[in-house]
Amino acid sequence: MGNSFGQLFRVTTFGESHGGGIGVVIDGCPPKIDISQVDIQRELDRRRPGQSKITTQRQEEDRCEILSGVFDRKTLGTPIGILVRNKDARPQDYAEIATKFRPSHADFTYEAKYGIRNWQGGGRASARETIGRVAAGVVAQKVLRSFYPKIDIVAYVVLIHELSAKIDRSKVKTSDVDANIVRCPDQTAAKKMISLIEKTRAEGDSLGGVIECVVRNAPIGLGEPVFDKLEADLAKAMLSLPATKGFEIGSGFSSTRMRGSEHNDPFEMRRGKIRTSTNYSGGIQGGISNGEEIYFRVAFKPTATIAREQKTVSASREQTKLAARGRHDPCVLPRAVPMVEAMAALVLCDHSLRQRAIRFSNE
Amino acid sequence: MGNSFGQLFRVTTFGESHGGGIGVVIDGCPPKIDISQVDIQRELDRRRPGQSKITTQRQEEDRCEILSGVFDRKTLGTPIGILVRNKDARPQDYAEIATKFRPSHADFTYEAKYGIRNWQGGGRASARETIGRVAAGVVAQKVLRSFYPKIDIVAYVVLIHELSAKIDRSKVKTSDVDANIVRCPDQTAAKKMISLIEKTRAEGDSLGGVIECVVRNAPIGLGEPVFDKLEADLAKAMLSLPATKGFEIGSGFSSTRMRGSEHNDPFEMRRGKIRTSTNYSGGIQGGISNGEEIYFRVAFKPTATIAREQKTVSASREQTKLAARGRHDPCVLPRAVPMVEAMAALVLCDHSLRQRAIRFSNE
Amino acid sequence: MGNSFGQLFRVTTFGESHGGGIGVVIDGCPPKIDISQVDIQRELDRRRPGQSKITTQRQEEDRCEILSGVFDRKTLGTPIGILVRNKDARPQDYAEIATKFRPSHADFTYEAKYGIRNWQGGGRASARETIGRVAAGVVAQKVLRSFYPKIDIVAYVVLIHELSAKIDRSKVKTSDVDANIVRCPDQTAAKKMISLIEKTRAEGDSLGGVIECVVRNAPIGLGEPVFDKLEADLAKAMLSLPATKGFEIGSGFSSTRMRGSEHNDPFEMRRGKIRTSTNYSGGIQGGISNGEEIYFRVAFKPTATIAREQKTVSASREQTKLAARGRHDPCVLPRAVPMVEAMAALVLCDHSLRQRAIRFSNE
Amino acid sequence: MGNSFGQLFRVTTFGESHGGGIGVVIDGCPPKIDISQVDIQRELDRRRPGQSKITTQRQEEDRCEILSGVFDRKTLGTPIGILVRNKDARPQDYAEIATKFRPSHADFTYEAKYGIRNWQGGGRASARETIGRVAAGVVAQKVLRSFYPKIDIVAYVVLIHELSAKIDRSKVKTSDVDANIVRCPDQTAAKKMISLIEKTRAEGDSLGGVIECVVRNAPIGLGEPVFDKLEADLAKAMLSLPATKGFEIGSGFSSTRMRGSEHNDPFEMRRGKIRTSTNYSGGIQGGISNGEEIYFRVAFKPTATIAREQKTVSASREQTKLAARGRHDPCVLPRAVPMVEAMAALVLCDHSLRQRAIRFSNE
């Protein structure tokens, strides 16, 4: 009962890595929003496997179909169903993981929780599950732009292992991000990151890193204290993505080493508007957006699937060893960039609808 | 519509810093759990103002009353209402903040979102709001212990500004935490932290830091993928607390600088059980608890209220200055420790009930 | 976990007939709505015991206090807490029902479900629980009128036992309803009803009946198919009231004896608007309000508490007898009229907010 | 945002009468429940068009596919996606209703609410939408039987227009119901009903009626006061079905003409158990099941689609006339029987999970 996200713009995803398919139902989308299969496919292509030499070499087309809720390229206000078919599974590929728990994967915990698991690949815990999120994120972005035409959500890699990037958060564009295969808009750093990922893969190992996301031109007033503060819902959204280990908003963990007099964001009048001089708050104060740039960072651990042999135990509780075969991502971050953007869009879209519902009358 | 938390063990808080009172309604508490006013009061005393020389010197008794849901010291299965009265406000104390937006507070965003705010103190954005959370956390802990008698939730300060503590996470006890007023179980570090807080207060400034929380003897199987993963709900819970800027589970942001071969937690058999040799995962894999210690860290920014004069703007949109008067916390962390424990208990209790609902039959 | 109602305008009630008090928390109320204790008290007085010779003679003042969410008589957009204190209980009055299950009451089912019950009076199953609903209904009406100034919700008794009333649904006003103590706007029928209730009480027995409710000038477009159709949420709202046994919208059960050619409501243009010539639909088509009068009827069973001796069993599972002592309502309908109006207002207010969230842009 | 039903066993349906397909996602289904495509197909065949001479003659196969959540015929605890493809639409069939609002249909209200509608057939308001409900109902029944092996849910027609049936509620079986095409287990009445339906169809008109449903061997303790009382959720479930106008539990509207001394159900000991001598309560007291038979009745209006010419207005707001062409049901009740059973199963299954979550410990 944890497969839905959002209160008003509510997405429900379904599907395992193997079986009929992966999909999403979006309930609560306003009517008359332009949307087409092509819009969704474009974004799915940013997350699909096999897109570059540093992602997994599995080739999956991930072709989406809109099943309902859209008529003549416009949303109807009814639930939007979207489906991506799975390719035929080759169960023999998974014979080993049917009986051995992969370290730092979900095999053991699913088995323990449910007493059963689909051992063909990652099952529900596969990153393939995020297809539904990315598809829904496209719709959320369309809704957001219908409300706030200038809103802009951009995520990008800022760290791979020890390699960090220098990025001007206020200016970075999607075209800069997609200009290289690691999705880091610092082109110099990107080259080093790509080399490091290739080298690490050759060593049978994997890497983690940090993705930053900035939202520009978001409206003032999004966020529902005290529990559904905007940063709280963003944190949940990001920590629900596979392989994430941390979240920080604005100054984040670095704020802990600052003093109040340094960290407070003074208010000032700028072009007739109340603005802050600095933005350590990350665009959110008291759980509500204040009109400044919203920005946050998400930590991704190194991919759990590695080619090196590892110690583990079998389902029959015997000590054994395991080495991943076949194709996998040596670093999930390049493909996680659209996932982060999608989850941010879902949170902002949901909060936009919530704010529309209660906004005070003289607005 | 963001004042409820949890799906089955569902708490709804209410109340501003001024007005009739602060409270909580807990819906979904199982029947026949022992609970009394004394249990709740004990924990409220850990978060109340005026408890030591390094917290605010406001003296508030924060006496709680159980309004419903408990009969002969046992829960009835009906909603538990708990109320703490506010003391009489002295509106003249707040004349200045009625017209000026305090930097990095919620004054401006509440005004912008709702078109109105209770300018007597922090209103709903006051940390006083957490009274309801702490009270509900006590009930959650009682429920958890009725299911898992050995479960243990302990939070503690690990960093104040540049001062970090050395703590054995597996052994730390609440009595160690409460042995000093900063709630850091490393007694040597604690002394330095206390001095630094006092010195900073004297300078009219404030400090932030990091609280770590460990949950020992949690059951295997808590967490509801894919959106309500256990760490996702913990992240939301923590980021919904006032003054928080970051969350990390297990290895957290440090995982980004490790390789998969270092970071993966190998499975092994220990005393007949499947365990992991290391615990970088932080006790959660695939969003589900795996029986190891659950641990996470929360970043708190330096208190926004400082005695130093700051630049700001007024409600009438003129540039002005503001200096906090009266009494406030130079560092929120000592009082935030019980808040972190409470939110952790709410998450775990809710997920325990959710798991009970669906657990497979041969259990 | 069933003590909340509504998706966006969300009320959570708490309290047993005995203990600290009865109350409600309203989350999701828009800001800047005028509301005062006096507004709420007026409506609570319409449901309180002891208001006339045909209600229970218990005298309860049911004085309400607004604990939060309102400042200078305006809503803040934060949760509104409302509390009504219970009077001191005299436990000795309830000695008998502590050990005997009252027929057609909730004593047995609460005991079976929870393994415990507050045997001092009705506990949570007492009609006293509806105080929170009526209080919240006042706030809901205020919100509705701020959106649709001419909206009008009027409920009234149309049947007591075999005595039915003749009422012009389109014209009935609250002043007509409150013109007599049985709250039936057909003054001739009302007199007979009052006599019958008095006579029945003297015989130690009780009566049921039907309440009709009409909503005039509701907007077009409320209702969220396919599950949260407007009539579906109204049905749930009404069946959640104590002592209700049935609900029908528009033509209701009588529609089953009509043919389609008689029952269909033809569309016509009237004063430039699309209207229906007849209104068997009851103002709702396809789960969405169509701008015509919304009307429905609710069946209330005869009060379960009667003075006559009845067969029952004891908690120790022995056959025994029981006769109600003290004061009780011989017929709940007069006091149920404000409850029906309150629940209707909660449903309409919630759906108004839901519709505001998604309404299409060229509106 | 009204396309989900249930708190723990949560179904979300999607799909219009035309477009890619109709489906459902079931989230919260316990793991290890046996389920197969064949089980679901059998029940879909009971609701499909073209099954007899008194239903619409449209021939739709309504073949279902399980997309996810089931592995080796067992549920995984992950979301179960089920899809039924739509057949190719012939848009020219709908040219007329694209521009004219059908009386007592949802054309006008959808247009008014959303500003857009899929005018190819009924769109989302089509009874075709119930495919997802019926499919989910099969899964719910499987879960219920895994908890309570003897539970039995049977619905049947008790009234068509003026023709009523005599049925022994405690003994009626599904095989009796399905023994004739009108699904009335009184075989004599059934014959008359079938003749009447045929005659009415020939006259270009339609009929309504009443379906009764009985649940035998339900457990004690289901229902979550005060808002999610079992009868309240049943009422909502039934009123969310197309063409329904009323709901009554147990004695229902007839209770209003009884006195308390007649209507109360005395408790008695029977075979060592606390039972009631009569069952006017309909198996629910105080909103919680008491172990007796749960029974209720649902009123269905005469089908809105009729062959006779009717007055209406066009989308361009001109008075016009309309006569339904093609094939439609002259009476929805025979096909509505499995829908009523499905919705009852969804409510009971959801409440079973909710009760499992909180049940007291010495159970």
Image (cartoon, coloured by chain):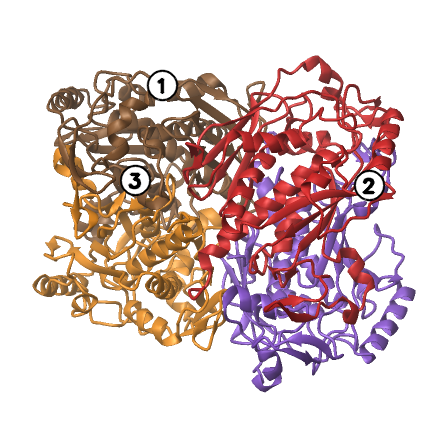
Chain colours: A purple, B red, C brown, D orange
Q: Which residue is mark 3?
A: D286
User: Crowdedness of circle 2 by 10 Å Cα count: few (<14), some, many (20+)?
Assistant: many
Q: Which residue is mark 1?
A: C45
Q: Give above or below for C141 relative to B346.
A: above
Q: The residue marked by circle 2 belongs to what chain?
A: A
Q: Amino acid at mark 2?
A: Asn
Q: Are marks 3 and 2 on the same chain?
A: no
Q: Viewer-nearest of labels 3 and 1?
A: 3
Is there CB contact under 8 Å for labels 3 and 2?
A: no
- Does residue D266 appear to the left or right of A183 in the view shown? left
Q: Return the residue found at the far front.
A: B271
Q: Give residue A279's mark.
A: 2
Q: Which mark is residue A154?
A: none
Q: Amino acid at mark 1?
A: Asp
Secondary structure under tag 2 reads loop
SS for dot 3 = loop
Secondary structure state at the residue bearing disc 1: helix
User: At 48% from the left edge and 25% from the top edge, which residue is drawn?
Assistant: C82
